[in-house]
Amino acid sequence: MSSTRYGRTLLGIWSGLLAISCLNEIAMDRSMVSAVAYYSEKPAFLPSCRIYEPGFTKCSTNSIQKLLDQLNIGIPEVLERFGPFDPMRVRDIVFKQDNNEVATIRANLTDLVVKGFANTKVKESRVSKKDFNWQTKIYLPKMRLDGRYEMAGRILLIPLSGSGKIFIEIDDLDILLLTKIRLYEKGGFTFDNVTSVQVQLNLTKVRTYLDNLFNGRSKEVERSTNEFFNENWRDFYEALKPLIVETVENILYDVMSTVFHLIPANFFVEDIPTPQQLYGPKEILGRKE
């Protein structure tokens, strides 16, 4: 190889190494700034609203829709703390229901994944001027829960004992979400601390399948039992309603807690009072907020 060609080759290698080094530095810089403790500047995707001006509810409804749309696209801090919005991994559930006409059952649900929140439509978002609690109406065309179950007891007079895979699929799910909050201050901003969530559900159809029902002793009985549950889905839903409600409440509590600790309440409601203004300085000091 001639010295000129050798020099060009060496120069090309070094140029490539330099480019790789620059890209690595850029990637490191991006990773360092991709997640923050909380936002000190309002994100571009989020419209702000003023609660003491006309049209607040319409503005707030649009604002929460934009937030959910962005969660579906991906917010780095939420992804880091919570994971993907859809499909979404949720907490394990231990469920017990006794002395109920429809069901007496004990069940554990694990490895839970919920799909469908990417298509959430916000129908209305209200905020109370008295305590700044939220009332939100949302709609999901379809929600599906997949996971593993362990179950013993009875549903619709059918004795059950088994463990395996389970799915529950719900059509046309209307959710009334009642969110209680407590304002707190951080870095000169007002934040919402979610203290509790409560949901009311309305739906038009439930489908399910419990694999390995009766511990696999009879696939034919397993199939016919699942068919019976689906044919009598209203009764099946009433039997498992507390479990489904708890699942939805856990999801919305975890999502809202993560978001509200990240994004100041000032960016949702521009004219929200400070905790001192709402509660008074004595109560703030007493609660050590």
Image: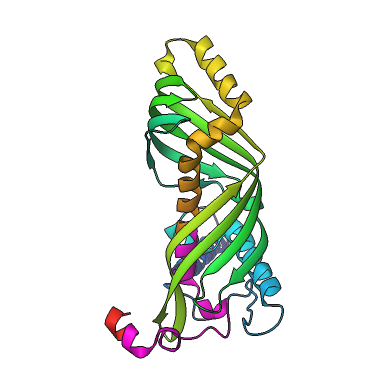
Can you give x and y, in whole percent of width and height, for residue 265 in the image? 51, 77
**Between 144 and 82, the one nearer to me in the picture:** 144
Left or right: where does residue 152 sit relative to residue 51? left
Q: Is residue 241 above or below residue 286?
A: above
Colour basis: rainbow
Q: Is residue 263 magenta?
A: yes
Left or right: where does residue 179 sit relative to residue 65? left
Q: Is residue 178 magenta?
A: no
Can you give x and y, in whole percent of width and height, for residue 53 in the image? 67, 84
**Between 8 and 243, the one nearer to me in the picture:** 243
Is residue 77 at all visible to an observer of this figure? no
Q: Quadrant of the C terminus?
A: bottom left
Can you give x and y, in whole percent of width and height, for residue 125 in the image? 63, 67
Q: Residue 184 appears in which quarter of the rendering?
A: bottom left
Q: Is residue 263 above or below residue 223?
A: below
- Residue at coordinates 41% horizontally, 84% vertically from top-left? 279
Q: Residue 196 appears in which quarter of the rendering?
A: bottom left
Q: Is residue 126 above or below residue 235?
A: below
Left or right: where does residue 188 sit relative to residue 71? left
Residue range (magenta) = 255-283
Numbered disc total: 0
**Between 200 and 124, the one nearer to me in the picture:** 200
**Between 100 and 161, the one nearer to me in the picture:** 100
Q: Quadrant of the N terminus?
A: bottom right
- Residue at coordinates 51% horizontally, 49% vertically from top-left? 248
- Residue at coordinates 57% horizontally, 63% vertically from top-left? 8
Dominant secondary-structure state across the stretch colored magenta: helix
Is residue 128 at all visible to an observer of this figure? yes
Can you give x and y, in whole percent of width and height, for residue 272 in the image? 53, 83
- Residue at coordinates 43% horizontally, 33% vertically from top-left? 100
